[in-house]
Amino acid sequence: MRPFLRDRAAIGGAVAVAAVMGAVGFLPLFGGPGYESALGAGLVLAIVVPVCVALELSTVRAPPRDAFGRGVATGAALAGVAFATTIAHGLRIGFCDLAGGAETFALGPAAGALLGGAWGAVAGEVASRRGRPASRRAVAVIVGLAGPIASIGVSVARFVGSPMVFAYDPLVGHFSGALYDTVVSSAGLWTYRAGSAATLLAVLALAEHLGRTAEGRVVFRSAGRPGLAVAGVAALVASLAVTASGPRLGHWHTAASIAEALGGRLEGVRCSVVYPRGMRAADVDRFARECDADVAVEERWFGAPGPARITAYLFADSGQKAALMGAADTYVAKPWRREVYVQAGGYPHPALGHEIAHVIAGAFARGPFRVAGSLGGWLPDPGLIEGVAVAASPADSDLTGRQWARAMKDLGLLPPLARLFALGFLGENSSTAYTVSGAFVSFVAETRGAAAIRAWYGGEDLARVTGASWHDLERAWHEDLDRAELPEAARAQAKARFDRPAVFGRRCPHVVDECRARADRQRGAGDVDGALASLAEVRRLDPGDASARLSIATATARGARAVEARALLEALAGDATAPRHVRDRALEELGDAALVAGDPAATARYDEVALRTVDEDRLRTLDVKRSAAEGAIGARAVVELLVGAAGRGPDRLRAAELLGAWAATAIADGMPEYLLARQLTAAGEWADAATKLDVAIARGLALPRVRREARRLRFVAACALSDGAAARAAYEAYAADPGLPAGRRAAAEALRVRCGDGDEIGRRTQ
């Protein structure tokens, strides 16, 4: 065989790898070692390595042992080229996490390149049997590509045929599956690559026992080394054992293995719920009723029936969901399987209706995945897919999607529809993309009807469905947005919510978000110094992140360094270059510090922040803290519940004790009962919460926003308890409030419909 540096196939492969990795490295997420660069390198090497090795070995009939060695060596060399290119980009723009990125690369594409080289040796042997050089090259390419295609095909088959969205691939490495999950764990690669190492050892042992006759045929022969044979057999057994243990090791799952791991199943009228056995029966029953009601409501919105049954996988938390199907913080639906996958999220569930809308829409979509898209549904249209679900099941928000879109238009943040209803959807931050696409689909539904939505989703061009061009539709929509009424503070809130880069436009999002999550855990555990170190790493990687400065200041305050924390907050609040919403958070933190110290300046801080806030929950919290700052009875309980004493965070246990004492003495004030009820609703104790809310409302609540929220919670509690009469009464009292924001009113109406449907639906448990 020729030396590596003289082999044209290997040189061409090295140039191709360097060119591709060099080009993609200019994308922010791919600049330097990390998850994305490893995934990109894995895809490139999975194709290039086997083909290069097969082309080289197709021209010679090397001994199997030498062919194996050359294949592995070529794979290692090309992996080295890919990694060197990635390192070059890291040197150009800075490293996010060099050690972690190198580990991910080694376990992912580098190990896969060794396996790809071994497969290339097999492909080269097959190709070498052809007589003509052109035939040998063609067979080398075809057989070389057959390996990665088959390997990726297995992952695709698992994606299509099971709840899984992640994949461990022998040649590519690890694919997390969820685009919006920035904290990605590749811990399973260690055990997966243990199986890869065993496979390589078994193939090496086999190669040592293969020889070639004078005619060039490969034959089995004794190597005269029994220990090697034993090691090869043991390695083969280990490789097969790792493969067979995939579900236990978290490498792959099936619907059956996930159902077995969860263990519980409840049959509703339209929904089959698969849930963890340890979950409270009342919570599961409530979820099943909500699922049944959501199906009925979404069918009503679409004006068409969905599948006869939908299976809802309910996971205990994001960690369990990530381990079993791959999406930690992203809710998922698979319309072609008529399944949704969510983690427990209280009542009403924040995303169940949205995911069910995807499945209902799939009933009139084309293509194998039953989603909107061109080319017969093979090329998805994420803007239409998500826009329909948002429109059919709008999120609980203070402003409607139409109002948020109007605010974005006024700020110059509204993306053009041509970009949004195409793959350009993925280039926007998720809040912008989902909100705007949902607002436009709602406009089409309101002006053209559900039949137009079904036809559009089913593959017909919207211009043909509506009789108006995209340009005219966009202009009409903008005119409609201009008629939407906006609260004065809406634009400031919209800028904070939507003027952010998409995950693909961020640098080091995985490391930055992991550092943030670690800081939160450390602060919660009382490790303030550890939290500050993690936040300092965030600042190093993203110096312009003003929210990290805010987190550092609050962590410093928790470390009982009040003077230092106040100085940091004052500097941030007065920094005109920092985003307005971050400065307002700093002002609120300064107000909290004043509240704890008994300084009446807290009131002015809270009033200033309220001027630029439309979030009803935050405004209500400001009202309660302002009341405490003005010397209201029970101020100490409010401080313990919402702020915490100097040097530490909120203490709910101490707050509950103080609230109980307050409730026992202030029989004409419903505030303590309301605050206790909020803790009970968060814990899912709906019956006790309803009792306390009734007492709070009867005693009276002086703050209008608190009174409004008490009525809303009483309505939600009645729905959760299937108490139709109480739900109707609470809803009427809540909806009659003239100060109710439009978005909250729409959310309450949606829940009223679901609550009514849920009250009429029966079910049986299996």
Image (cartoon, rainbow, N blue to C red):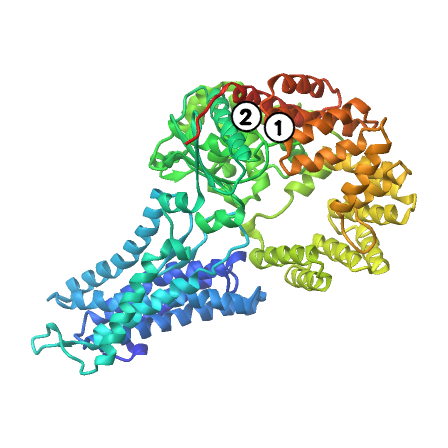
Contact? badges 2 and 1 (CB < 8 Å) = yes
Residue, disc 1 = 402
Secondary-structure class at tag 2: helix
Numbered marks: total: 2
Residue, disc 2 = 442
The quadrant holding residue 243 is: bottom left
Q: Nearer the viewer, residue 550 or 446?
A: 550
Residue type, numbered disc 1: Arg
Label 2 crowd (10 A; few <14 / some 14-19 / many >=20):
many
Of labels 2 and 1, earlier in sequence is 1
Q: Quadrant of the N terminus?
A: bottom left
Is residue 258 rendered to the left or right of residue 680?
A: left
Residue ID at (86%, 40%): 635
The quadrant holding residue 675 is: top right
Spatial CA distance of label 2 from label 1 is: 8 Å
Image x and y of residue 609, in percent: 80, 40
Q: Nearer the viewer, residue 452 or 335?
A: 335
Q: Quadrant of the C terminus?
A: top left
